[in-house]
Image (cartoon, rainbow, N blue to C red):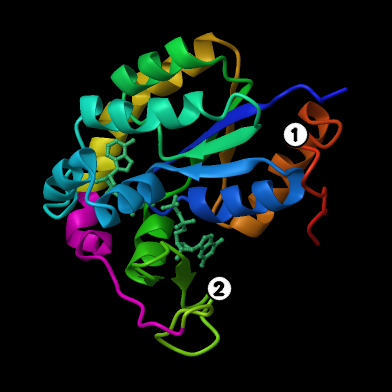
Amino acid sequence: MMAKLFRAVIMGPPGSGKGTISERIAQSFGLKHLSSGDFLRENIAADTEAGVLAKTYIERGLMVPDHVMTRLLLPRLEEMTRHSWLMDGFPCTLTQAKALNSTCDLDLVISLNIPYETLKDRLSDRWIHPGSGRVYNMGFNPPRVQGRDDLSGEPLIQHDNDQPEALVARLRHYKDVAKPVIDLYKSKGILHTFSGTETDKIWPYINSLLSTKIPSRPETDTQHIPLP
Ligand SMILES: Nc1ncnc2c1ncn2[C@@H]1O[C@H](COP(=O)(O)OP(=O)(O)OP(=O)(O)O)[C@@H](O)[C@H]1O
Ligand SMILES: Nc1nc2c(ncn2[C@H]2C[C@H](O)[C@@H](COP(=O)(O)OP(=O)(O)O)O2)c(=O)[nH]1
């Protein structure tokens, strides 16, 4: 018999560790890690209509409009009816949350609450492999060879909008748009908020919460490998 499917969302401001924690969850619990940023990059690389449109916003450091995001993501989620997944980066507005709601029932929402100074320090030190979206931090998870992606060896880049001047505006914007989404999930009783300055300290709490919610492997083709 197939285990019950599990659908979760992870929310948090830029630099809060959504990508890092999502990877740990995917590895430990066998959920598929879906990332709005990765979907966008795939569409941009494939020159799809939505990708071409999204690129014009991303290049200016702006959020992609809701109708483009939902047109892009909801069909992909509808294809995932037989999979358990964790979505990172979507929804980030109330319109997106309502659209997601009409497609599926979420089991759990993780919200990361990280102090501004911590976000600023992390992002000013974030390096990205543009081809894959792999993320490094010179202190926390440095690449094996400085300035180069571990798998491809290609150069890493920094985003202008990760720098402190742009970050203040991004965080203010995140707070404004995320608040009603957080309130919605709180009212549904599925919101779990984790606060702290270090991913390694937050992770055990998330791990134990998920262990109570996902008692057995949700997929047959993945392994439950607890992390150290
Ligand atoms: N749900 C969304 N709604 C609107 N725009 C989005 C959404 N998700 C991603 N984007 C756009 O895609 C860009 C890349 O997203 P991605 O999540 O990879 O990186 P990011 O901007 O560095 O975010 P974070 O710092 O939170 O990781 C965002 O800057 C934004 O323009
Ligand atoms: N110093 C430090 N850096 C951390 C920690 N957790 C994650 N990072 C790094 C990895 C990235 O370079 C950056 C942001 O993390 P991310 O997972 O990309 O965050 P998000 O933007 O997806 O929410 O911070 C952490 O606990 N300490």
Residue 66 lies in quadrant: top left
- Is residue 48 toward the left or the right of residue 103 in the image? left
Give neighbour class at mark 2: few <14, some 14-19, many 20+ (Cα, 10 Å). Answer: few
In the picture, the quarter occupied by the C terminus is: bottom right
Residue 17 visible, this orientation: no
Residue 78: horizontal and vertical position, in percent?
A: 49, 23
Q: Which of the 4 quarters of the picture holds residue 98?
A: top left
- Relative to 98, is 228 above or below? below
Q: Callout 1 environment at 10 Å: few (<14), some (14 to 19), or many (20+)?
A: few
Amino acid type of the residue that numbered disc 2 sits on in the rendered structure: Asn
Q: Position of residue 197 (x, y in %)?
A: 54, 55
Residue visible at 14% across and 42% down in the picture: 53
Total numbered badges shown on the rendered structure: 2
- The magenta segment is 153-168
In the picture, the disc for residue 141 is 2
Q: Which quadrant of the figure has residue 131?
A: bottom left
Q: Residue at x 51, y 36 (%)?
A: 87
Query: Is residue 65 on the magenta stretch?
Result: no
Q: Tag 2's secondary structure?
A: loop
Please give left or right for residue 65 compared with residue 199 in the image: left
Tell me if the residue at label 2 has its CB under 8 Å from ligand 2: yes
Q: Using the image as rendered, state which of residue 142 and residue 54 is in the foreground.
A: 54
- Give the residue pinned by disc 1: 209
In magenta stretch: residue 167: yes
The vertical placement of 162 against 86, above or below, is below
* Residue 107 x, y percent position in the rendering: 64, 20
Give residue 122's position: percent from left, percent from top: 42, 64
